[in-house]
Image: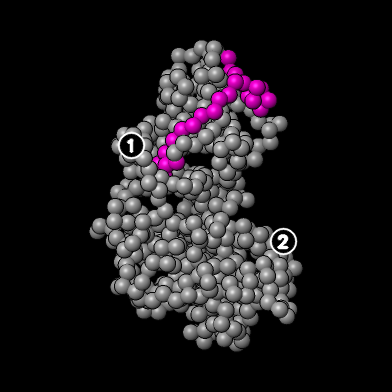
């Protein structure tokens, strides 16, 4: 049975400039908070970021070491699989290229892992070449815990579930390992421009 | 405490499309800490999809993703589901 | 142990708006007629779905505020200023309009006269809706089971169902208000957020083994549930329905 149209219902949607929204997306003015679990509160003294797995030697940064790395401002559009998009969001973060610099690996796959147990898989090639960051600031402020702070992945060319909140590291892997949502219906790759939301899309 | 967190009751409608019995009064046993609770007492989080977590240890008991035509459910985090007929 | 209700698989069905009434400046009760409605139990809710002409959809859950009866049900909706769904429901809907709903669901947060009491109902703002369904059912059934409603609202004008609760007060039902933001002149009642002391003064004690239902915004429910456990109430006798951050 097709859905009943409710007279006059529009929802709270903005109008986006043509071509800016991937198919099936709607523009939002606020920043919905969506979480698969309770907000972790790891104190900065205990926070670290690790790159391990198919690497010669694991790499590891404390918060101070991480924040001493060269960082940049990123202005980008973000697209959530639940259909909202936000344009021209402003972040500050460290490029994954910087974190991966000098790491020798034959791995082609990665799994980002977070406090609370969340994981998401992203091909290594999608994290390099200036396409991904570990972000610590949003909108000019330190990244709030409900939005993934102190640091989250920022991989804006894929649906935003691939930008793991509360990220603590990356595991490089020889084989692809579908993560928390990829094992439960969400698309393994997640390109919003090809509307790859679910398995089989 | 998370402001967004809901109770298992919040997914009653979604589960009612699949199960022929009222699910919020069914009992789940957590696969991590073995504590039993009503589905209605689980903690519900809405991320890209929905997660039901154990109120005692936060272990993910159930994951649900849906679109208009398909629904995916993962009960691996739950050890046992008990329904009274 | 709860008997699980066999209800068959539910799906979205059409609901016709038959009435819209203001409860408070920000709150309206919308009455629906749902052809084929099989009835509901007090405390249950429905999922509401709105579809725009271009296919865009939004879904929300609302507790059924009316007592069970016929094919009519009432939802009480708080208008959240920047909300996506509530302003449409409170500002736009008129008799003759249609929405879709799925339900009733939620056998966990339910009371029937056969369940007995004593009852302790703790409501934060619009969280009173499912508890009102229980209170209305209790009245319709002629039950005099010891029932205490502790109802937190911002101020006197924001009290949803205020007059009806005043009329129903008595015959075993005690309604206690707390007004957290401002109070009318001469107010002698509670003027603070619900806390353990208030619950101890108002409610049956743990020794009476009351059935407790707490409903409202998530932070409210968290604080009340914690206070109740702190007072010695058994967690398994406390049923909660969290509405999320804003109560919408």
Boundaries of the magenta span: A57-86
Which residue in the protein does label 1 denote? A19
Q: Residue at x 47, y 47 (%)?
A: A29
Q: Quadrant of residue C175?
A: bottom right
* Tag 2 and tag 1 share a subunit: no
User: Crowdedness of circle 2 by 10 Å Cα count: few (<14), some, many (20+)?
Assistant: few
Quick check: A53 left or right of C146?
Answer: left
Q: Nearer the viewer, residue A166 or C22?
A: C22
Q: Which mark is residue C224?
A: none
User: Crowdedness of circle 1 by 10 Å Cα count: few (<14), some, many (20+)?
Assistant: few
Q: Nearer the viewer, mark 2 or mark 1?
A: 1
Q: Quadrant of the C terminus of chain A?
A: top left
Q: Quadrant of residue A198?
A: top left
In this view of the protein, can residue C180 be seen by the observer?
Answer: yes
Q: Farthest left residue?
A: A1
Q: Position of residue C17 (x, y in %)?
A: 35, 72
Q: Position of residue C63 (x, y in %)?
A: 47, 67
Which residue in the protein does label 2 denote? C230
- Look at the numbered disc 2 and give the secondary structure of its residue: helix
Q: Are marks 2 and 1 in contact (CB under 8 Å)?
A: no
Residue A70 drawn in magenta: yes
Chain under disc 2: C
Q: Is residue A172 above or below residue C36?
A: above
- Look at the numbered disc 1 and give the secondary structure of its residue: loop
Q: Residue at x 56, y 36 (%)?
A: A138
Q: Position of residue C207 (x, y in %)?
A: 70, 72
Q: Residue at x 50, y 45 (%)?
A: A31
Q: Position of residue C75 (x, y in %)?
A: 44, 70
């Amino acid at each position: 049975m097709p859905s009943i149209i409710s007279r006059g219902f529009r929802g709270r949607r903005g109008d986006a400039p043509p071509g800016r929204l991937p198919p099936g997306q709607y523009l939002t003015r606020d920043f919905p908070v969506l979480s698969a679990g309770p907000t972790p509160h790891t104190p900065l003294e205990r926070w670290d970021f690790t790159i391990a797995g198919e690497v010669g030697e694991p790499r590891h940064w404390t918060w101070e070491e991480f924040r001493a790395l060269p960082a940049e401002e990123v202005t980008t559009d973000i697209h959530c699989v639940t259909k909202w998009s936000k344009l021209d969001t402003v972040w500050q973060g460290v490029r994954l290229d910087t974190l991966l610099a000098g790491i020798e690996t034959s791995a082609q796959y990665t799994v980002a892992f977070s406090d609370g147990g969340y994981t998401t898989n992203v091909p290594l090639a999608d994290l390099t070449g200036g396409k991904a960051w570990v972000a610590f600031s949003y909108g000019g402020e330190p990244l709030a815990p409900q939005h993934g702070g102190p640091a989250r992945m920022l991989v804006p060319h894929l649906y935003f579930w691939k930008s793991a909140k509360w990220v603590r590291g990356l595991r490089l892997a020889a084989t692809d390992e579908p993560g928390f949502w990829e094992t439960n219906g969400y698309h393994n790759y997640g390109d919003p421009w090809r509307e790859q939301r679910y398995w089989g899309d | 405490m998370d402001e967004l967190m809901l109770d298992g009751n919040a997914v009653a409608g979604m589960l009612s499309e699949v199960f022929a019995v009222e699910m919020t009064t069914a009992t789940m046993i957590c696969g991590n800490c073995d504590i039993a609770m009503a589905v209605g007492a689980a903690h519900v989080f809405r991320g890209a999809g929905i997660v039901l977590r154990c109120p005692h240890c936060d272990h993910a008991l159930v994951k649900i993703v849906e679109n208009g035509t398909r629904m995916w459910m993962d009960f691996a985090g739950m050890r046992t589901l008990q329904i009274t007929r | 142990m709860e008997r699980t209700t066999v209800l068959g698989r539910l799906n979205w069905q059409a609901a016709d708006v038959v009435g819209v009434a203001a409860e408070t400046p920000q709150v309206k009760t919308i009455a629906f007629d749902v052809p084929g409605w099989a009835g509901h139990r007090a405390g249950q809710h429905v999922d509401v779905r709105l579809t725009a002409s271009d296919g865009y959809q939004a879904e929300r859950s609302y507790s059924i505020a009316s007592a069970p009866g016929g094919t009519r049900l009432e939802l009480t909706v708080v208008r959240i200023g920047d909300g996506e769904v509530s302003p449409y429901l409170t500002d736009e809907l008129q008799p003759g309009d249609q929405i879709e709903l799925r339900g009733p669901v939620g056998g966990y947060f339910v009371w029937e006269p056969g369940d007995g009491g004593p009852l302790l109902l703790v409501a934060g703002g619009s969280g009173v809706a499912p508890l009102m369904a229980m209170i209305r059912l209790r009245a319709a059934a002629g039950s005099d089971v010891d029932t205490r409603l502790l109802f937190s609202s911002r101020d006197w004008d924001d009290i949803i169902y205020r007059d009806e609760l005043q009329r129903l007060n008595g015959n075993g039902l005690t309604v206690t208000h707390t007004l957290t933001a401002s109070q009318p002149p001469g107010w002698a009642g509670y003027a603070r957020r619900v806390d353990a002391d208030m619950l101890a003064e108002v409610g049956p004690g743990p020794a009476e083994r009351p059935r407790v239902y707490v409903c409202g915004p998530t932070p409210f429910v968290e604080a009340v549930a914690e206070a109740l456990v702190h007072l010695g109430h058994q967690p398994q006798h406390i049923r909660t329905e969290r509405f999320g951050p804003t109560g919408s």
